[in-house]
Image (spheres, rainbow, N blue to C red):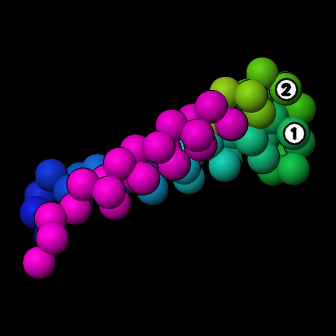
Amino acid sequence: MEPRHRRLILLAVALCAVGIVWIGQGLGVIRGSSFMTDDMRWALAGAGLLLIGLVVGWIAIRSRPRA
């Protein structure tokens, strides 16, 4: 696997993970003393970030070098 492809996959995974956490905090599923808890704006921002992560992952998978 070439380094560029690996970086895109890692970026996609990180974006999706952060997006899921933001959705959970925005919806109040993940509790804590964060200012993000129960704030729908963070759930929407997380959904956007998750979507971007999925697109980056899709691009990385589609552009992988063929053996």
Magenta residues span 47-67
Residue at the disc numbered 1: 27
Please state which amino acid type lies under the numbered disc 1. Leu
Left or right placement of residue 64 versus residue 47 in this view: left
Residue at the disc numbered 2: 40
Please state which amino acid type lies under the numbered disc 2. Met
User: Residue 19 versus residue 56: which sits nearer the camera?
Assistant: 56
Q: Classify mark 2: residues with Cα within 10 Å, few (<14), some (14-19) or many (20+).
A: some
Q: Secondary structure at mark 2?
A: helix
Residue at 77% over, 33% down: 43
On whether residue 62 falls in the magenta region, the answer is yes
In the displayed structure, 41 sits above or below 12; it is: above
Left or right placement of residue 47 versus residue 28 in this view: left
In the displayed structure, 48 sits above or below 17; it is: above
User: Residue 41 versus residue 9: which sits nearer the camera?
Assistant: 9
Q: How many marks?
A: 2
Left or right placement of residue 1 versus residue 40 in this view: left
Quarter holding the C terminus?
Answer: bottom left
Estimate the spatial distance between the alpha carbons at disc 1 and disc 2, rounded to whole Å: 6 Å
Q: Are marks 1 and 2 in contact (CB under 8 Å)?
A: yes
Q: Main secondary structure of the magenta part?
A: helix
Residue at 40% over, 44% down: 56
